[in-house]
Structure formats: structure tokens, C-alpha cells
Amino acid sequence: MYRGVQVLALVLVMTSVAGMAVAQTRSLTAQPSMKQASPQASRSQSSRDDFARDREVMVESQILERGVRQPSVLEAMRSVPRHLFVPPEYQDQAYQDRPVPIGSGQTISQPYMVALMSELLQLKPGDRVLEIGTGSGYLAAVLSRIAKDVYTIEIIDSLGEEAREKLARLRFDNVHVRIGDGYDGWPEEAPFDAIILTAAPPKIPQPLIDQLAIGGRMVVPLGSFVQDLQLITKTKDGLEKRNVAPVRFESMTGEVQQPQRR
């Protein structure tokens, strides 16, 4: 979801007064052999509506139960056909509480992580969003159901082309895909009301900070081997930062890793 961007396996345990929530990032090592028994497996996959019940169960048991409450995020998670963003052989796993392989050594993020990061952005209908790391296009599709426009950049050519085609075919017409290094953002479309990164830079690229509007929010996994999922709000006086949870995403690659950029 790069880059480069490939996210290593993680089980993130977040403890609160209410209890324990488990979150996983995209995994490079998700094992196809670990399929769980699922009622979807014997079902025809010809209709998007076949999976409506699975989306509802996903929202109720994985997302609401862990504290995500923003109505627009919940509605987007209920409506976007997640199974169409994974290869056919993995569609029976699409709504499970785990990442799913999408090719090129990448996976589609766990549903809860998608919902959590989306809610942290606190999007409004007129907002414009920049995403660094398109992956399958699923997160961009979810964001597009909440915001006005989503601009997304993918460093892996094959993933970017496939996501562009799929998003167009499914009529996510307010998602705009660019293939390339996300370090410099999308300056001609700036400023953005929200920016989200799906790989961990050692330091936030300055162009992305510059392209975030005053009052805008950025969600980014920041650090090296172990990172903090950070929520950053840009004010007229600077940046306000809040650590949300410890996470493990793959490091962002490309220009951000050049010595002069660190």
C-alpha cells in the first residue's frame, strides 16, 4: 500500500481500560496456507452483493468492537467491496481479521488498520486527501467514499497500473493514481486537507509537510524497526504530534532513504 512499501508481519496489541485490541499491518509473509474456514469459500463470487453480510460482520466484530466510531468511516467500510481488491484465489479471506496477499510481495491491510487510520484523518465531505502508497487501491477507495478527492502515489509500477485500472472499472472516479516515488508528494494539487502514508519513513519528507494545509492532519508510521503511528496536525504555529500506537510497517523506500534526505 511504496516506496516503496511493503509492510512486514505484525501483531500489534493495544491495551486500554476497555480491554485489548489486536491490529496487524500489511504483511510480506502472509501465508496462503493459513486459510481459515469461511462460509465464503463455497459461494459464487460473481456478485459484489454476495459479500454484503461479510462486510457487516467485519465492521461489527473487527472495527466497532475496537472503538472506531466515525459514521462515514463505518459506512465506507460497509460499502467498499474489499474482495474485489484481492486476487480471486484469496477472495474467501478478504474479510478476515488479517492482511491478504495482493502480489508483488505486498498485502492488503487488515480491515481494522484501514478503519483506524481513516478515522484518525477526521475527513469531511469536501476534503482532498493525498495517499503515499496505493497498493491494491483499497484504502484509496475507502477514503474516496468519505472525502471529495483522493490523490494516491504508488512506487511499484505493476501495482499502480492494476490499482488504476481497478479503481476506474469500479467507478471510484474521484481517485487519481500516479506511479512514482511519493517523497515529493503531488505539488500541483496541493494543499491537501489530509495526508496518509502506508510505509514508515525515518523522517517525514519536508515536501509532504509543506503540502499539508493549515489545520490538516497527517497519519504516518514513523521510525525504523519499531515505529509509532503518529497523528500530526499542522497549525499556523507549527506541527502538533500525537503518538497513537506502536506499529511495525515496512520502511518507506526511494528518495527518502538517500543520506542527504535523512
Image (cartoon, rainbow, N blue to C red):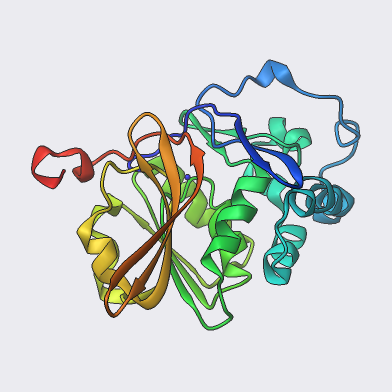
Residue 256 in picture, x, y percent from top left: 22, 44
- Outermost residue, left direction? 260
Query: Which of 130/248 is in front?
Result: 248
- Outermost residue, top direction? 33
Q: Residue at x 82, y 43 (%)?
A: 45
Residue 241, quarter of picture: bottom left
Number of numbered discs present?
Answer: 0
Q: Up-down: is 2 above or below 130?
A: above
Q: Residue at x 45, y 36 (%)?
A: 249
Q: Up-down: is 167 above or below 226?
A: below
Q: Quadrant of the C terminus?
A: top left
- Outermost residue, front direction? 17
Residue 67, quarter of picture: bottom right
Q: Residue at x 69, y 71 (%)?
A: 72
- Left or right of residue 57, residue 5 in this image: left
Instruction: Mark yes or no: residue 198 visible.
Output: no
Residue 34, quarter of picture: top right
- Left or right of residue 74, residue 129 in this image: left
Residue 220 in picture, x, y percent from top left: 41, 52
Query: Which of 49/54 is in front?
Result: 54
Query: Which of 207/248 is in front?
Result: 248
Residue 27 in picture, x, y percent from top left: 54, 30
- Left or right of residue 49, residue 142 in this image: left
Residue 64 in picture, x, y percent from top left: 78, 54
Instruction: Mark yes or no: residue 171 visible.
Output: yes
Q: Up-down: is 210 above or below 66?
A: below
